[in-house]
Image (cartoon, rainbow, N blue to C red):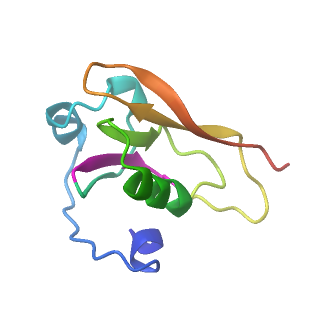
Amino acid sequence: IAHLQQNGFKVTEHNVDSNAPLRASLGIPEKLGSCHTARINGYVIEGHVPLAEIQRLLTEKPLIKGIAVPGMPTGSPGMEMGESRDAYEVVAFAADGTLSVFAKYAANP
């Protein structure tokens, strides 16, 4: 949330015990689940997605449902631990269930 707010997004926060029902209602594949779910300009953003990928999504406007970073990889926005970063992917998901790699982030030991 802070990552988005610090970069000019207006965020309305809703704290819930589980976001699983919301993820299901928005069509987010279960295996892409994480701890944060957002809706921005008709797209769904799941997990700790870097700002650059959200901006790319909003600029390019691909015909997908949204993007996700599954889990909570070290080094993703909000999961920073010094210079350490896990390798992770930003995954695009379409309404028909198709998944594709939207972006890749390399590990930084």
Tell me where residue 101 appears, x and y as whole percent. 55, 31
Is any atom of residue 104 visible in this view?
yes
Q: Main secondary structure of the magenta part?
A: strand
Quadrant the N terminus occupies: bottom left
**Where on the picture, by quarter, is residue 81?**
bottom right
Residue visible at 37% across and 30% down in the picture: 93
When asked about the image quadrant of residue 30, the answer is top left
Confirm whether residue 78 shows in the render.
no
Q: Is residue 46 magenta?
A: yes
The relative height of residue 52 versus residue 88 in the rendered view (above or below) is below
Vertically, is 54 above or below 12? above
The percent position of residue 63, horizontal first and vertical second, equals: 32, 36
Classify residue 16 as left or right of residue 106.
left
Residue at (64, 39) in percent of width and height: 88
Residue 53 lies in the magenta-colored region: no
User: Residue placed at 53% from the left, 45% from the top?
Assistant: 72
Considering only vertical position in the picture, is 91 above or below 109? above
Name the residue: 24% across, 58% down. Answer: 41
Q: For the magenta stretch, what is the residue range?
A: 42-49
On the picture, is 44 further left or further right than 7?
left
Please provide percent x and percent y for residue 15. Answer: 21, 60
Percent x, y for residue 105? 69, 45
Q: How many marks?
A: 0
